[in-house]
Amino acid sequence: MEFELDILPLSVWLPHQEAAIIAGPCSAETEEQLVATCLQLKDLGVSALRAGIWKPRTRPGNFEGHGEIALPWVQTVKKLVDLPFAIEVATPQHIELALKYGVDILWIGARTTVNPFNVQDLADALQGVDVPVMIKNPVNPDLALWIGAIERIHKAGVRKIAAIHRGFSSLQESKYRNPPNWQIPLELKRIFPHLPLLCDPSHITGDRKMVAKVAQKALDLNYDGLMIETHITPDKAWSDAKQQVTPSELEEMIHSFNFRKQKT
Ligand code: PEP
Ligand code: MN
């Protein structure tokens, strides 16, 4: 039996206009890349910035993030751009370091949500900590695991919570990198009507040409916001090159969005 969670509205911790937009590179590659990207995002009306600091990839041997070395770069950005900054955390130590360096918003990645052992470790580390936490869906199309992760973080006392829909892995041939299976996030929203729901069209599509269309579909479904990977030179990105857009492409996309749907 599900119960309604006691969750604060998104606008309390992520002020936004029609929809919250979180933008920034997949990975923090160099201080210059992070600063240049974020400076270009400064005046686009985005609500928060993002970057991956720890990036264990599906298979080893590629760039895996700089870890703590990149956290002072986040501080540099925060001095230049007055926006909250979000990073992914996967271990209690990541949480400790994120808070030490003044990161504003945490998110739990799809490969972590899938594992209740990891999620409980994060929940334990979040006890008594007032930081917003966004929870991506698990990589596999399992709504119960997603709900379980949200409940574990909620039980730790976190009230600034949002869910992020980033699509699901599938064995079927698909034009998507991670097919959206829209019925799963919509069922989550039916169960928890007050839970803010964001869409990550970058990881759903894996293809920058499809990002705007999936983002618009999420807006049409009354999602509360979007997380869109944005890179100063996407083709040269060290991770997820195909799906990242430039800040000016993001600007164009934001202007093209139809926000007319009424919030329920
Ligand atoms: C990311 O946002 O860069 C990321 C790794 O996402 P996901 O956990 O959705 O794969
Ligand atoms: Mn990515």
Image (cartoon, grey):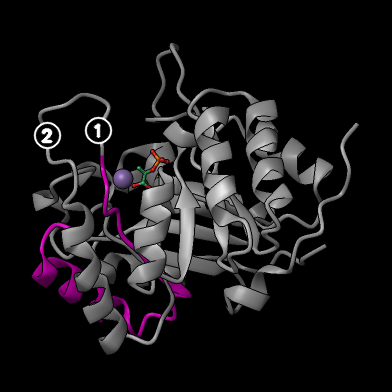
Which quadrant of the view contains residue 37?
A: bottom left
Q: Earlier in the sequence, mark 1 or mark 2?
A: 1
The quadrant of the picture showing ligand 1 is top left
Check disc 1 and report its element: helix, strand or loop: loop
Report the quarter where the C terminus lies: bottom right
Report the quarter where the N terminus lies: top right
The residue depicted at 65 percent of the width and 54 percent of the height is: 220
Check disc 2 and report its element: helix, strand or loop: loop
Residue picked out by circle 2: 62
User: How far across and how far down the image is residue 65, in percent?
Assistant: 19, 48
Q: Is residue 217 above or below residue 181?
A: below
Tell me: is circle 2 under 8 Å from ligand 2.
no
Q: Which residues are magenta?
A: 28-55
Amino acid carrying mark 1 in the image: Arg
Q: Are marks 1 and 2 in contact (CB under 8 Å)?
A: yes
Q: Nearer the viewer, residue 113 or 44?
A: 113
Amino acid carrying mark 2 in the image: Asn
The residue depicted at 54 percent of the width and 29 percent of the height is: 117
User: How far across and how far down the image is residue 239, in percent?
Assistant: 19, 44
Let me know if residue 36 is in the magenta part: yes
Let me know if residue 234 is in the magenta part: no
The residue depicted at 64 percent of the width and 58 percent of the height is: 161
Q: Is residue 83 above or below residue 258?
A: below
Circle 2 crowding by C-alpha within 10 Å: few under 14, some 14–19, many from 20: few
Disc ID at residue 57: 1
Total labels drawn:
2
Asked whether residue 143 appears in the rendered view, the answer is yes
Q: Give the alpha-carbon distance from disc 1 to disc 2, as whole Å.
A: 7 Å
